């Protein structure tokens, strides 16, 4: 799978997961309607489906690599949706995790 396709699929999965979790957050923490759970559940199902589309021989490796994408997407969510800009520590940590994602996905394998 090409790098752009893999990273794009991970990015879509991250948006779906964050949106699904935020729907539950909104219901329980922001006193939003219980109806928020419907799109939240749909988003979480979409997230799980998208992770199965990653070209990886092992689920654990796909999930581990996803972690870095999720962290970056969470900080973008915080910035765009919650109007709180990431600080230098957030950005630095996300960059380190992003590098780890690339190593996990594209590091040379012996078998």
Image (cartoon, helix red, strand yellow):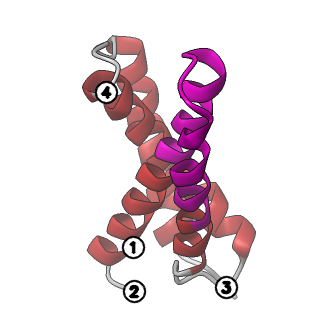
In this rendering, which labeled residue sits more in front, label 3 or label 4?
A: 4
Give me the disc on residue 6.
1
Estimate the spatial distance between the alpha carbons at disc 2 and disc 3, rounded to whole Å.
Answer: 12 Å
Mark 2 Cα shell of 10 Å, populated few (<14), some (14-19), many (≥20): few
Tell which of 83 and 95 is nearer to you.
83
16 or 8, which lies in front? 16
Question: In terms of sequence position, does the residue under pointer 2 or pointer 4 come before the other?
Answer: 2
Give me the disc on residue 57. Answer: 3
Q: Nearer the viewer, mark 2 or mark 4?
A: 4
Q: Main secondary structure of the magenta part?
A: helix
| Quadrant of the frame with the C terminus | bottom right
Return the mark for residue 1. 2
What is the spatial separation of the Cα atoms under label 3 and label 1, in whole angstroms?
A: 14 Å
| Residue drawn at point x = 52 percent, y = 34 percent | 22
Q: Which residues are magenta?
A: 17-45
- Quadrant housing the N terminus: bottom left
Mark 1, Cα crowd under 10 Å, few <14 / some 14-19 / many 20+, is some
User: What is the distance, in whole Å, between disc 1 and disc 4 at their CAs?
Assistant: 25 Å
* Residue underneath mark 4: 81
Give the secondary structure at mark 3.
Answer: loop
Q: Residue 34, located in which quarter of the rendered image?
A: top right
Query: Please, is residue 2 above or below residue 38 in the view?
Result: below
């Amino acid at each position: 799978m090409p790098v752009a396709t893999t990273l794009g699929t991970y990015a879509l999965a991250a948006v779906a997961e964050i949106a699904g979790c935020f729907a539950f957050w909104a219901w329980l923490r922001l006193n939003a309607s219980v109806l928020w759970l419907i799109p939240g559940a749909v988003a979480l199902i979409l997230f799980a489906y998208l992770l199965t589309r990653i070209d990886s021989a092992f689920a654990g490796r796909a999930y581990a690599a996803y972690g870095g994408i999720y962290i970056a997407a969470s900080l973008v969510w915080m910035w765009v949706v919650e109007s709180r800009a990431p600080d230098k520590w957030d950005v630095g940590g996300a960059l380190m995790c992003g590098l780890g994602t690339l190593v996990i996905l594209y590091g040379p394998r012996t078998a």
